[in-house]
Structures are given as C-alpha cells and as structure tokens.
Image (cartoon, grey):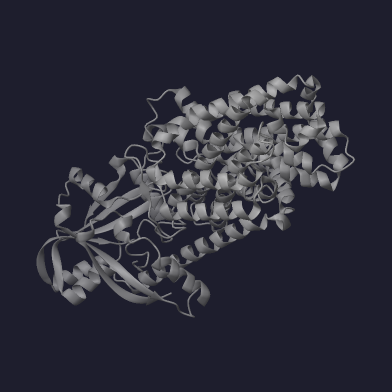
Amino acid sequence: MIGDTPPEPQASATGPDTGAAAAADTTKTNAQSDSVPEGSGEAEAVSSHGHGSEGFWALAVGSIGVVFGDIGTSPLYAMREALFHTREGTNAELAVKGVISLVFWALVMVVTVKYVLFLMKADNKGEGGTLALMALTQKALGKFSPTVFFLGICGAALFYGDGIITPAVSVLGAVEGLKDAPGLGGQMHHLIVPISAVILIALFMVQSKGTAKVAGLFGPITVVWFLCLGGLGLYHIFDQPGILVALMPQYGIEFLFANGFVGFVILGSVFLAVTGAEALYADMGHFGKKPIQSSWLFFVLPCLTLNYLGQGALTLADPSARENPFWRMVPEVAYWPVFALATMATVIASQAVITGAFSITQQGVQLGLLPRIDIKRTSETQAGQIFVPQINTMLMVGVLVLLFAFRSTDRLTSMYGIAVTGAMMVDTLLAYVFLRHVWKWKRWQAWALIAPVGLLDIVFFGSNLLKIPQGAWLPLLLASLLVLIMLTWATGTRTLTEKSRRDSVALLDLVDMLKKRPPHRVAGTAIFLTSDSDLAPVALMHNLKHNKILHEKNIILTVKTIGVPRVPEDKRVTIEIINDDFKKVTLNYGFMESPNLPRALGLCRKLGLKFDIMATSFFVGKRSVVPSANSGMPLWQDKLFIFLMKNATNPTEFFHIPPGRVVELGTQVTV
C-alpha cells in the first residue's frame, strides 16, 4: 500500500480543505458557486438520477422496497418485546392497548412528523442523510464548525452500529417463525441460528454482483409483504373490535403511569417499531420526496397500524398469544407462504442497510472522514450502485459474531435501538442549525419545532441507555471506535496539510524561477496531483531537484469535493492557464461521487485542452510518515493515523489512473 500523505495524491478524498470543512472553506464555496448552479434540490436530484422519465408509481413502489424494508419487519418482534417487559400486575387490557397506543404515536411523531413532514424538506440538492445535512449546514455557517463536524461523524458512526445489528435481528426474527411452524413440533429450534447464518452469508456474498437486478424485485415483494401485514391485522381486528380505541393517546399515557419506571423501560421496546425511520431521509435522493411521502402516508403507515391493532386484538382474545403475537396471527394454511415472504422481507431490509453502509462510506471518504477505500461500481447507469469489499466483509463478520453470540431476537433487541436513537438525536441537533442558518428562522421559531421532537428523542435514547448492561454497549463501543478513527484521520490530514503549506513553494514563484533558470525540457505531458493548486506539488519539486527536467506541458491537477451530492458533467472541469508551460485543472465532484480521472480529463477536450492520456505521465507525491511526540496528536494517535494511511487504497486505483502511467516521487515527513 502507498503511504502517501493526503495533501498530494488524495486531493479529493481527504484533507481539511476538501474534506471535513468542504462546505465551510471559502475555496470550496467559490468552486461550488462557479461549477454548480443553484436550483431546486429535488428537481436536480431527480434529473441527475435519471428518474425524470420514470413514473411516479414506479418510484413509489421502489421506495417501499428500499426505504421501508427495515421498519416493515418490526412487527415480527416489537409488540412481543414491549409486552414482555410489562410489569407484573398490570391490567392485561391496559397493557395491550397502551403498547399499541405508544407504537402508533411513535410512528406518527417520529416518522411522520419529524422525518416525512419536516426533515425531508431539509435536503442538500435532493439528497438526505446525516452527512448530507452536515455538509449543508457547514456551508450555510460560512466557516468550519467543530461542533457540526463532530455531530456529523457521530451520526455516521452510529449508522454503522445499526448496520451490523439490523441484518442479524431482522433475518433471525423471520427464521424464528420455525418455532411455531405447523407440523414441526418445535423440532427445528436448534437449526434456527444456522439457517439464519446461511441466509446472511449468501446475502453478503452476492453484494459484489450488484443490486441492480435484485432491486427490481424489492419493491413488489415488499408491497406484498405490507399487504400481508395489513390483511392479517384487519382479519384479527374482528377478534376484539374495541381495540380501535387504542389509537387514542390517553391509553399510552395511562399505561406509562401504571408501570412507573418500567414504563420508561418499555419505551425502549416500543422504539423497535420505528427503527428504520432514518432510511426515509437517507434514501431521499434515490426516489424523491413525494414518492416516499406518499408511500408512507397512504400505504405503509396504514398497513403497519392495522397489523399492530390485529396483534393487540388477538392478544386480548387469547392472552397466550403475547408470547409471539405476530406468528400466532398467521393461519395454519398460510403459515409457510407467510414465512417465506417474511424471510424475503427481512433479507430486503438487511440489503437496504448494507447498501446504506456502502453509501455512507463513499460519502465519508469524499468528505475526508475516512481513508481512501476501494469502491467498485456495479452499474454503468445507476450512480448509487456501488460495492465496498472491505465494508462488506467487516459487516458480515460483525453480523455473524452477533448472531452466534446472542442467538435470539430476545437478546439481540436489547442492543437494538441505541444506535438508531443516537443517530436520530444527531439529525435533530443538525436540523436546529439548519433552521437557524439555512431557513433563517428566529431562535424561538426553531426551538418551537425542535424542542418537542428533541424531547421525544431524549426520552427514547434514555430508555435505550437502560439496555447497556444487556448488550447496548456494543453498538456504542463500535460507534466510539469509528468516531476515534474519523477524528484521527481528519486531524492527521489537517496537520500534514498545514505542514505541507509551510514547507512548500508558491506555484507562481516557482514559475518565475523557472523562467530565470530554465531546466532541461522533455517532450510529453506531465500531470501533477495536488490538493492545493496554489503551491508547487511535492512531486514537481522532486522531479526538478533530482531528475532536473521539466516536461513540455505541465498540468497541476486538483480534485475537489464540494458540499453537494453530485456535479453535472458540464460543470466538472475548470481550466486556468498560467503560461505556456503550466495549466491548472480542477475537477469538481460531489460527496456522493467517486472520482474517475481519465473520464473527467476526457472532458478537457471540449475546453480546448487536448492530450493523449496514454502518452501522459501522472506524478504522485508519496510521503512516508513517521510519528512525532511534538505533533498535535498523542503518539498513539499518530501511530493509528500512520496505520490508516498505510492501509488506504492505492491512489492509482482510487482515481482509476492507468497503472503504467504513474510515477511516484516521495519523501519522509513527521506527524
């Protein structure tokens, strides 16, 4: 692996001026204003995704498959877990109606009000998610904000924690249906975990093939799943029609008071019903706001509500059903078809989280939060179709460890929710900054909206904190390690960039010196990668110092990541002519794009800069970094940063440069 420092070959991937502070840096702001026209966020997102010609209903069905897969599997275990934690002695009817009331109003307040009606309007050129919101608020502030930056990396880190738990708990929740399967008499109990492991391994193994073909089936299958949920619920509501009154909020409030502190604990189980709500926001750019909003309000929410009401009615009619109310709802004649459908639905839910982890990784690399990592595109037409081998392997290992360590959804759900509630709190805090600085709301107006939503987040987060002894510490530990890695990477790259600027020569000064003392000239074109086009690249200085030559044509190439999701091809390249020998070329990328230098440089022909890329040499500055006790970070953190650098993807692969055209010139620096 190449251990070069970010300021030279990693221009787009890291460094404070192209990473964490991308939206705040004035250079980036100017670059954005020059290269990306302002306009309606969603319209641009839809256009750039190629969805403009697709029908509204196709997008709505697609969103049901990708966006709502996680929240659609919650009925498998949410009701059961909430009833399980009910305090002994609580009136059985009040317990059932209270849980349903809490679940319904959690769906209304958290999903509908917070995400569907509010946060989906806080888009970054049509894209949503924690990192997109962070980039947008950083740009609006006009300067780098450590607080906003820290919130962003916390949200991203917590998402990975959710990404490990969701596949395990979802698939296991479906396969546990074998316990009550007719004709088996509980004989399959010992095979539940192995069967779940086989399904999960197969899911992770097919990721490298891409999800373009499979994704076409996601929507229709999930639509059938939600229809099944709604149908089962409607069928059993007639067991106790009076269950409909459970939709009134007073039952939830009365239930909480009746259970005292245990009621606070139960809220952690109630929250299981809304896990996956953050996907509404994160996946907004793939389908647009209106298809997602319509799917939720007119289809998904009614189906979920009917199912929870049906589970409640069945439990009132048959109290023994509280042990596993969902599977007790299923008629024996339809048990196996529903079991197969549930398994497919949980696989789809897991797929959505896995691809979400890939997208978060890509954004993290582009925003300078993570080292370069191998990102493969699995589709030539769909921008969101990517595969990240290292993340896929780490997720698979993590999921399997959880599966075999906890072995049941009863134990897995103890840790489920803490990562999601934490991520939701981050979204709320960033939303306050968004209201104040993007929408320019007054302080009291912003507090009027954020305070009730934030209070709800705090209550749910506090309730899930009580699960720490039962396993909730694991996602928090994982998130903490990821926050440490991202902070170390961002701090280390900033330190090296600052040191590089102090030790470098201004490019214009070098040009003047070369006029006075011309070096030996050779034919051909040399492209020097750098993160700061105002400074002479290290590779150029070494080429002059050691080889004592200068090419006929020299291009100073800078790749910038700006605070928008994607940059149109006609705005990708800007060229600045210094003199006959030197030209500056800037390639602009959004934080959801992977840089491809040969493809982007091909656009230079339209701007009058013509050269044969196979007759061109790319000069990459390779820096060997050694730890220093006098740096801004502790020695152990220096060593962690160096480890990350050594294991970063080769810049040749990351930028898709033809390997035979790369020349590496390096030096040793301290950090």
What is the quadrant of the N terminus in the image? bottom left
Residue at position x 33%, y 67% in the image? 2
User: Where is residue 445 drawn, in percent x and y?
Assistant: 66, 39
Residue 166 relative to residue 565: left or right: right
How many labels sit on residues? 0
User: Where is residue 602 drawn, in percent x and y?
Assistant: 21, 46
Residue, far bottom: 629
Residue 565 relative to residue 69: left or right: left
Residue at position x 35%, y 59% in the image? 11
Q: Eyeballing the image, is 466 above or below 274?
A: below
Residue at position x 58%, y 47% in the image? 168
Residue 31 relative to residue 392: left or right: left
Residue at position x 14%, y 52% in the image? 612
Query: What is the quadrant of residue 254 in the picture?
Result: top right
Regarding residue 460, the answer to whether it shows in the image is: yes
Q: Eyeballing the image, is 353 above or below 471?
A: above
What is the quadrant of the C terminus in the image? bottom left
Query: What is the quadrant of residue 343 in the picture?
Result: top right
Regarding residue 432, the answer to whether it shows in the image is: no
User: Where is residue 373 drawn, in percent x and y?
Assistant: 40, 57
User: Where is residue 594 drawn, in percent x and y?
Assistant: 36, 49
Q: Nearer the viewer, residue 538 or 203?
A: 203
Q: Nearer the viewer, residue 491 or 336?
A: 336
Q: Eyeballing the image, is 644 above or below 243?
A: below
